[in-house]
């Protein structure tokens, strides 16, 4: 099966690509800088600069993980726009790819599209499930626009699954990598009051 991945050079994407290849699938990756990510992906991975470049190699499935890292910089107004654009623009591009492929009956069967626990906003100490009304703040608006952009693929016969991902805690990257430096310097301590609700998972949770 041909699987098109955006965000393939990210923490989860780099783990997903080799697992797909080991399982007999063919990973295909969208990256603006193929020459920089090639060494991080399995040998022979088909890397192209735009999702639309794959119109001649129709994917059977899409995994949409692209996006500017959420905690990389302070959330200035300019950074907020970058966070939105880096998710929404590539998702629109994937929808356009599905539209073009639908004309030849080769639209992907499914698209798994990323979102985040930030969809719900700050809920204090409430237990949250998919029916919980979101708190209107930037994290929610970001995730809502990302999810709304993905909805259009269903018009072209592609099934859509949205993953509201929590903190990814694992060796080699993700949230844990950002937390470890002060501990390695002997300066680590408790994060806040210890009652924050933040669902965590490992890379294997999403790729296994």
Image: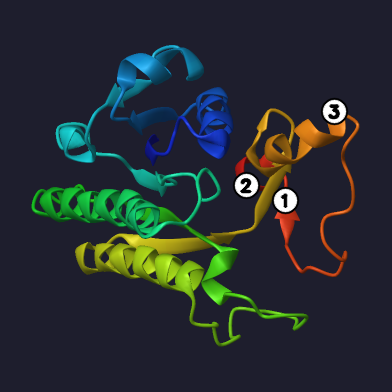
Please determine whether, in this image, residue 143 is positioned above or below residue 94: below
Quarter assignment of residue 203 = top right
Q: Residues within 10 Å of mark 2 (few under 14, many from 20)?
A: some
Q: Secondary structure at mark 2?
A: helix
| Residue 43 x/y as whole percent | 45, 12
The residue that mark 3 highlights is 184
**Relative to 153, is 139 on the left or the right?**
right
The residue lying toward the viewer, choosing from 33 and 102, is 33
Residue at 52% across / 71% down in the picture?
119
The residue that mark 2 highlights is 206
Q: Does the residue at mark 3 contact the one at mark 1 (Cβ under 8 Å)?
A: no
Quarter assignment of residue 149 = bottom left
Q: Does the residue at mark 1 contact the one at mark 2 (Cβ under 8 Å)?
A: yes
The residue lying toward the viewer, choosing from 156 and 171, is 171
Residue at 29% across / 54% down in the picture?
85
N-term mark: 3 or 1 = 3
Camera-nearest label, 1 or 2: 1
**Circle number at residue 201:** 1
Q: Secondary structure at mark 3?
A: helix
Residue at 11% across / 50% down in the picture?
100
| Residue 6 x/y as whole percent | 38, 40
Residue at 55% across / 87% down in the picture?
133
Quarter assignment of residue 66 = top left
Q: Does the residue at mark 2 contact the one at mark 3 (Cβ under 8 Å)?
A: no
**Relative to 66, is 203 on the left or the right?**
right
Camera-nearest label, 3 or 1: 3
């Amino acid at each position: 099966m041909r699987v098109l991945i955006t965000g393939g050079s990210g923490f989860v994407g780099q783990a997903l690509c080799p697992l797909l290849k080991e399982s007999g699938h063919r990973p295909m990756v969208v990256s603006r800088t193929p020459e920089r990510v090639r060494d991080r992906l399995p040998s022979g991975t088909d890397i192209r600069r735009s999702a639309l470049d794959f119109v001649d190699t129709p994917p059977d499935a899409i995994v949409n993980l692209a996006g500017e890292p959420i905690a990389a910089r302070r959330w200035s107004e300019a950074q907020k726009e970058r966070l939105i654009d880096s998710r929404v623009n590539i998702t629109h591009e994937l929808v356009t790819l599905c539209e073009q492929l639908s004309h030849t009956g080769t639209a992907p069967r499914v698209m798994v599209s990323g979102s985040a626990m930030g969809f719900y906003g700050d809920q204090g100490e409430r237990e949250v499930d998919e029916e919980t009304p979101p708190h209107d703040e930037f994290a929610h608006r970001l995730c809502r626009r990302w999810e709304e952009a993905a909805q259009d693929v269903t018009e072209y016969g592609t099934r859509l699954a949205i993953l509201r991902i929590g903190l990814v805690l694992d060796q080699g990257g993700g949230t844990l990598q950002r937390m470890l430096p002060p501990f390695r310097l002997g300066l680590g301590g408790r994060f806040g009051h210890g009652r924050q609700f933040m669902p965590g998972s490992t890379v294997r949770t999403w790729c296994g």
